[in-house]
Image (cartoon, rainbow, N blue to C red):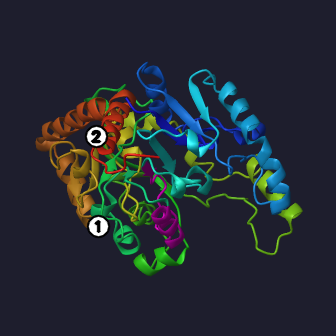
């Protein structure tokens, strides 16, 4: 069994609570913690953290001479973080590239540069996780430089993402599809017949201003179907209960400017971490209860080519999920009309599909879809099942790779 090696694991907030989070007393979105726990629980797997020269992450963007000094404390940061997360005895720390082994599987994360640090110099099997994919050219260049053997994402971006095909056309290898996992709190608690026969629509609306996004899609909105519903909430009230929220709603975040000096920049960082708030209405209700209040749910997809995690959460709560039929869900093994209700992304088709299932004679079919979706989620979107599948796919991809030395 090969070793699983993460790049700067101690700084990956999807896997552990990082030192920054401890200092600022922030909560963490442990999106992949279940995968780390699954690996640690297997006695046949050795989990490693390769702490690179770029592995001091508590403070960033200081002058290079200062950073060279601070980076000497990277192993102390690693040791503290692993101990605070109660995994210090379960993780092997790798301090030098030459200590990597020929059959290691090395995993980097795209969303922060130091989580892919030194990958271009590693000649083991390499996987890059594309979570929080944005489609920027600089990311494409960095990933191409890292030369991964496989990319991982919630969907096969070759199929679902126009911007990926446009700026990552050089990538001709396979994707490993890594589904979202619903937290344990997302459970079915109310009988279907006691729920309101409307669609519950939820999800945050965000915007991307980088040139590649605008050149591809024209408008900066990343979730246009969510915005469409929010903008028309009153006119579709009989079909859909809108709980979507604009990310900038009620925001008092202090914006960063290129003209800020270092003291002003870090003051804004501190203020935004400790004082700034937004989406107060969105966070004022219990999401699990809302899913259980409705027979149908909708979480508009990202135009980038990725569904929202809310579709897994809604299905896990027993809702009949409504989603676009452009390949998002088929890549996960779901079938339209069986596990979810498909629509073409337009407001007219959405109203037509909801109205169809609001009719008394179609209620049995609606409940059948909800039940099939629920069973599918229980089998395929729970932590251990997803972790086992991801590990199996990584091992099989590694076995078939032509890399055989470090």
Q: Residues within 10 Å of mark 1 (few under 14, many from 20)?
A: few
Q: Secondary structure at mark 1?
A: loop
Q: In the rendered image, which residue does mark 2 sit on?
A: 396
What residue appears at the point 60 percent right and 57 percent down from the top-left corner? 113
Mark 1 or 2, nearer chain start: 1
Task: Give the quarter of the image for residue 225.
Answer: bottom left
Residue 404 image offset from top left, x and y in percent: 37, 46
Task: Give the quarter of the image for residue 7.
Answer: top right
In the picture provided, is 75 more to the left or to the right than 179?
right
- Quadrant for the N terminus, please: top left
In the picture provided, is 260 more to the left or to the right than 241?
right
Which numbered mark, 1 or 2, is in the foreground of this view?
A: 2
* The furthest residue to the left: 361
Q: In the rendered image, which residue does mark 1 sit on?
A: 346
| Residue 156 within the segment the image draws in magenta | no
| Number of the label disc, if any, that sits on residue 243 | none
Residue 313 image offset from top left, x and y in percent: 39, 38
Residue 260 image offset from top left, x and y in percent: 83, 70
In the picture provided, is 67 more to the left or to the right than 89?
right
Asked if residue 187 shows in the view, the reply is: no
Give the residues in magenta: 126-145
């Amino acid at each position: 069994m090969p070793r699983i090696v993460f790049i700067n694991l101690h700084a990956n907030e999807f896997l552990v609570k990082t030192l920054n989070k401890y200092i600022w007393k922030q909560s963490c979105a442990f999106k992949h913690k279940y995968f780390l726990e699954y690996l640690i629980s297997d006695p046949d797997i050795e989990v490693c953290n390769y702490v690179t020269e770029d592995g001091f992450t508590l403070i960033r963007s200081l002058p290079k001479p200062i950073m060279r000094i601070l980076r000497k404390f990277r192993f102390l940061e690693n040791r503290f973080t692993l101990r605070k997360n109660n995994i210090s005895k379960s993780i092997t720390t790798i301090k030098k590239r030459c200590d990597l082994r020929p059959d290691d599987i090395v995993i980097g994360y795209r969303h922060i540069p130091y989580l892919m640090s030194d990958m271009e110099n590693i000649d083991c099997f390499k996987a890059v996780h594309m979570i929080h994919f944005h489609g920027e050219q600089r990311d494409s260049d960095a990933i191409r430089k890292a030369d991964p053997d496989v990319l991982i994402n919630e969907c096969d971006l070759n199929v679902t993402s126009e911007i990926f095909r446009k700026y990552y056309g050089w990538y001709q290898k396979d994707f490993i599809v890594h589904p979202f996992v619903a937290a344990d709190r997302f459970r079915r608690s109310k009988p279907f017949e006691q729920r309101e026969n409307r669609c519950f629509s939820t999800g945050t609306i965000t915007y991307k201003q980088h040139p590649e996004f605008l050149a591809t899609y024209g408008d900066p909105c990343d979730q246009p179907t969510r915005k469409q519903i929010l903008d028309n909430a009153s006119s579709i009230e009989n079909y859909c209960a809108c709980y979507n929220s604009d990310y900038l709603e009620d925001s008092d975040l202090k914006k960063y400017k290129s003209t800020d000096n270092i003291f002003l920049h870090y003051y804004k960082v501190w203020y935004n971490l400790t004082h700034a708030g937004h989406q107060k209405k969105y966070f004022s209700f219990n999401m699990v209860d809302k899913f259980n209040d409705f027979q149908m749910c909708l979480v508009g997809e990202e135009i980038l080519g990725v569904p929202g995690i809310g579709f897994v959460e809604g299905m896990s709560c027993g809702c009949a999920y409504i989603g676009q039929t452009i390949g998002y869900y088929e890549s996960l093994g779901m079938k339209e009309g069986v596990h979810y209700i498909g629509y073409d992304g337009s407001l007219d088709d959405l109203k037509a599909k909801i109205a169809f299932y609001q009719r008394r004679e179609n209620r049995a079919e609606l409940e059948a879809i909800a039940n099939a979706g629920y069973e599918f989620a229980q089998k395929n979107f729970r932590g251990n099942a997803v972790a086992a599948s991801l590990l199996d796919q990584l091992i099989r991809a590694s076995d078939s790779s032509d890399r055989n030395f470090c």
